[in-house]
Amino acid sequence: MKRAFFIFALAACAAAHGDLLKSPMDWKPVQTNEIARWKAENSAPKGVVADKSARTVRFLAEATGIGADETVEFLAIGPLSDRAYESMFVTVASPAAIAAACEEIGLPLGKGVDPVAARFWPLGEKVTMSVKAWGKNAASRPSGPITAFLKDARAAEEGRILEAPFAYTGGARDALGQPVASTNAPCAVFALYNHGPALLQLDGMLDQSGSYGRFVTLAKHEEGALYEVQISWDGKRRVKEVDLKLTADNAGEEMGSLKDDSKNFDVHATISFDSSVTIERATAVARAFAMLDGAGVKMNGCGKGQFFFRSFLPEEKWRDRASRAFQPFEVHVAEDGSRSFTFVEEDWSGEGLDPVLKPRTTPFKEWSELPGIIAKTGEQGAKIMVMFIYAPKSARVADITPMIGAVFPRVNTFYVFGE
């Protein structure tokens, strides 16, 4: 049954995603002479210019020539990208040059989405953007906000996100502090789904598969047609990061403070539990904060050495191994404090469509033993990055958090079941 579902899912994905029928293509600048003229007129040899007093950044881009009513995943990509087939524009400047210009006008570096760090909301100061036709036949081509170029097929149901200010995260950085988007595909300047390396993001939680098909082109623009893109910032810092220090009984007070902050700030919050909080209490608190998430406050990331708050909200049906789509690692903590690790091996050698599950349990005493035990799970275990923790509801969260330091990032997703 699982194999049949997987094959069906692949077929459905192929049918739904038109990009599987397209081929990546390297971009070659079309209007090289006009690009050179823009650079000279703007004293911008890198293809981007910053105006500190106006707090604006302008950069030149070429239209990819993509047709009308086409799904796009990027508003703009850098010149080294091979994703012109799913983007509206290719910038003349590199993402690194655009990021440097944004920082020159004072825009602070934010944080892109990062599922490993449980950061699912783009964090960055808010900017607006306009696109102006430039060069040959500019007067006859559209100019304006990005809604003059894209339409949101789900605006009525999910909100008019294209009309809201955008988040400048600055994108993920390499060891030297440079945007990885400058060198690593898809080299995104502005992605239309949550993509950590992109410099700019829509201000929402938009996973790639769920957002596919939502943003489509309004019209075809001639390949190589030039447009000047302008990013504007009003200089006001609205992002506020808060790490809530929660005890067994202060959650209501801290939640009230968050709501007050959200009236004036774009609040991104994490939770850290102190030694007084039990698993049962953490579950109740997580349930309350889940209702707040996205409703004025963004629960985004983990406190240092802490579980993501949704780790305490697993689906009860996941307890049934036979009905799971995959088998995570399991850690069991008994009432007396004894601990064991279970690797549920999936044996596909039989004739049935479902594997035979072979749980293999290893007792251990110290959390530091876990990496060695995990290493012995072999090739099948090497693909597992999720861990389920089963512990008494009365146990303290602080008693199980040390396992995070022992196994992260080898294991990066955790769910805690109170027993």
Image: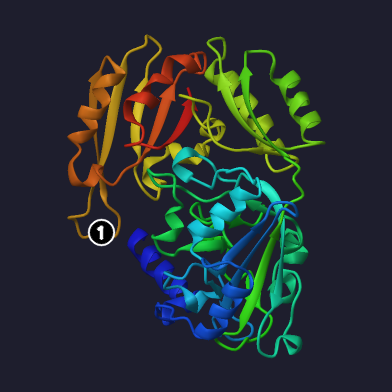
Quarter location, residue 378: top left
Q: 349 and 175: which one is in front?
A: 175
Name the kind of residue labelled 1 in the image: Gly
SS of the residue under disc 1: loop
Q: Is residue 302 above or below residue 23?
A: above
Q: 259 and 170: which one is in front?
A: 170
From where the camera sits, is residue 316 visible?
yes
* Residue 212, position as x, y percentages in the image: 56, 67
Say how many tags the image has.
Answer: 1
Q: Is residue 401 above or below residue 300?
A: above
Q: Is residue 106 above or below residue 349?
A: above
- Disc 1: which residue: 352
From where the camera sits, is residue 74 visible?
no
Residue 193 falls left or right of residue 129: left
Q: 149 and 151: which one is in front?
A: 149
Q: Is residue 236 above or below residue 21?
A: above
Crowd around label 1: few <14 · some 14–19 · many ≥20 (10 Å):
few
* Residue 137, position as x, y percentages in the image: 69, 90
- Quadrant (top left/top right/bottom left/bottom right) for the N terminus: bottom left
Q: 166 and 4: which one is in front?
A: 166
* Residue 68, position as x, y percentages in the image: 63, 85
Quarter location, residue 36: bottom right
Residue 361 falls left or right of residue 395: left
